[in-house]
Image (cartoon, grey):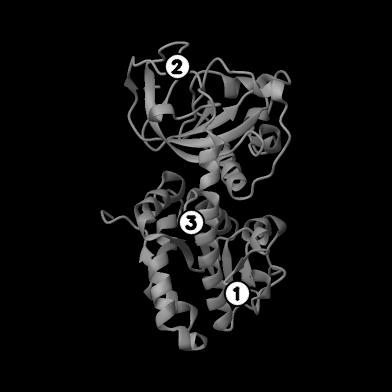
């Protein structure tokens, strides 16, 4: 516990059903507190956390879906030897394993898939929690009183999780529509995330937008295409990507950044503007996420590649140019965007 530091991630693992159910971010130094929270024991070694992502047991990510990506399944001395990595005392995981789980959980938040849960297995309770280095792992944890302890409490109430999606989808969809329409009006081909094609805004379905492409350019391999097809909005000229946009209204910014980072990693010669579009009040969060070690320690840091555009800036400027968007060029957005490099840099 004393090795934990602010910015580390806990990966929340739900025992019994063997699924990753959430991600927590450590927001304090470890501390000692004997205030009784749970009836079993005091569990005084604690850290404060923030919920980055939360799933339900039904939408949680089965660990076996990640078997090919996680090194904990390699060179096992016995078939169940991997369980020690998710049920032991807090310990550091390899960055590649941590990032694979975080990415999978974030994707599950944005694109939930419900899987049946055995109620008898769900009733099991783990004896210890587990942490993960820069990405830590915790069996079935919760941030009760913003603290993480050695025995989990009940999962967060689903009512809270259900209140946010409609608000998030409305803002997200509206901005997605504006960017798609702007690209189309400028004479560009446009692409919307494959799982969003059925959405509609202002009385029109995304699929009705002129110049919306049905398929991605063929010059990329299958792995790259699977990443690209989930990016919120793309502008294209022929087979060339002109700009990429990830829209983050209330969900974690991490997943969108990870998609962009994957794209640049897989296609290092791809030189296109990447934009994070988010509400004004999320500016600080955008800067914090873009400058995490995962992204800032790349050969070319993501804060030098990505730019930020606020919802209000985008809307105001589109209103001003509404009568002549067909004369605009993609570079128009460069004047609206803000750098993601921290002020101290």
Q: Residue at x 43, y 48 (%)?
A: 297
- The residue labelled by disc 2 is 38
In the picture, the quarter occupied by the N terminus is top left
Q: Residue at x 45, y 62 (%)?
A: 277
- Find residue 102 and report its image quarter: top right
- The residue labelled by disc 1 is 236
Q: Position of residue 153 (x, y in %)?
A: 50, 23
Q: Is residue 310 visible?
A: no
- In this rendering, the answer to whether 281 lies above or below 157 is below
Q: Position of residue 326 (x, y in %)?
A: 52, 87
Depth-wise, is mark 3 or mark 2 nearer the camera? 2
Q: Position of residue 232 (x, y in %)?
A: 57, 62
Ranked by sequence position, the earlier of labels 3 and 2 is 2
Tag 3 secondary structure: loop
- Find residue 14 and report its image quarter: top right
Depth-wise, is mark 3 or mark 1 nearer the camera? 3
Q: Are marks 3 and 1 in contact (CB under 8 Å)?
A: no
Label 1 and label 2: CA atoms lie apart by: 55 Å
Q: Residue at x 66, y 33 (%)?
A: 63
In the picture, the quarter occupied by the C terminus is bottom left
- The residue labelled by disc 3 is 248
Q: Position of residue 286 (x, y in %)?
A: 40, 54
Ranked by sequence position, the earlier of labels 1 and 2 is 2
Tag 1 secondary structure: strand
Tag 2 secondary structure: loop
Depth-wise, is mark 1 or mark 2 nearer the camera? 2
Q: Is residue 18 visible?
A: yes
Which of the two residues, 204 or 259, is positioned nearer the viewer here?
204
- In this rendering, the answer to whether 206 lies above or below 83 is below
Ranked by sequence position, the earlier of labels 3 and 1 is 1
- In this rendering, the answer to whether 42 lies above or below 315 is above
Label 3 and label 2: CA atoms lie apart by: 35 Å
């Amino acid at each position: 516990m004393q090795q934990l530091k602010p910015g580390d991630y806990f990966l929340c693992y739900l025992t019994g059903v063997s699924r990753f159910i959430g991600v927590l971010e450590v927001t304090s130094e470890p501390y000692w507190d004997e205030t009784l929270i749970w009836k079993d024991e005091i569990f005084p070694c604690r850290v404060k956390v923030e919920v980055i992502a939360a799933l339900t047991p039904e939408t949680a990510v089965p660990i076996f879906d990640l078997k090919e990506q996680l090194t904990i399944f390699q060179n096992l001395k016995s078939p169940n030897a991997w369980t020690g990595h998710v049920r032991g005392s807090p310990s550091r995981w390899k960055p590649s394993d941590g990032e694979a789980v975080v990415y999978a959980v974030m994707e599950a938040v944005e694109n939930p898939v419900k899987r049946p849960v055995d109620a008898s297995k769900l009733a099991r309770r783990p004896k210890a929690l587990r942490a993960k280095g820069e990405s830590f792992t915790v069996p079935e944890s919760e941030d009760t009183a913003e603290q993480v302890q050695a025995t989990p409490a009940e999962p967060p109430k689903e009512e809270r999780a259900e209140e946010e999606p409609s608000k998030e989808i409305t803002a997200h969809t509206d901005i997605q529509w504006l960017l798609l329409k702007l690209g189309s009006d400028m004479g560009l081909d446009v692409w919307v995330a494959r799982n969003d094609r059925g959405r509609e805004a202002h009385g029109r379905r995304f699929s009705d937008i002129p110049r919306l492409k049905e398929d991605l350019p063929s010059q990329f391999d299958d792995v790259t295409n699977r990443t690209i097809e989930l990016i919120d909005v793309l502008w294209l000229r022929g087979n060339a990507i002109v700009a990429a946009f990830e829209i983050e209204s209330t969900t974690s910014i991490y997943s969108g950044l990870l998609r962009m980072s994957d794209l640049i990693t897989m296609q290092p010669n791809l030189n296109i503007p990447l934009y994070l579009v988010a509400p004004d009040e999320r500016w600080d969060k955008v800067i914090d996420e873009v400058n995490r070690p995962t992204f800032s320690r790349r050969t070319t840091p993501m804060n030098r590649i990505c730019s930020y555009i606020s919802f209000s800036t985008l809307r105001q400027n589109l209103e001003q140019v509404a009568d002549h968007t067909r004369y605009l060029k993609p570079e128009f957005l460069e004047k609206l965007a803000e750098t993601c490099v921290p002020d101290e840099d």
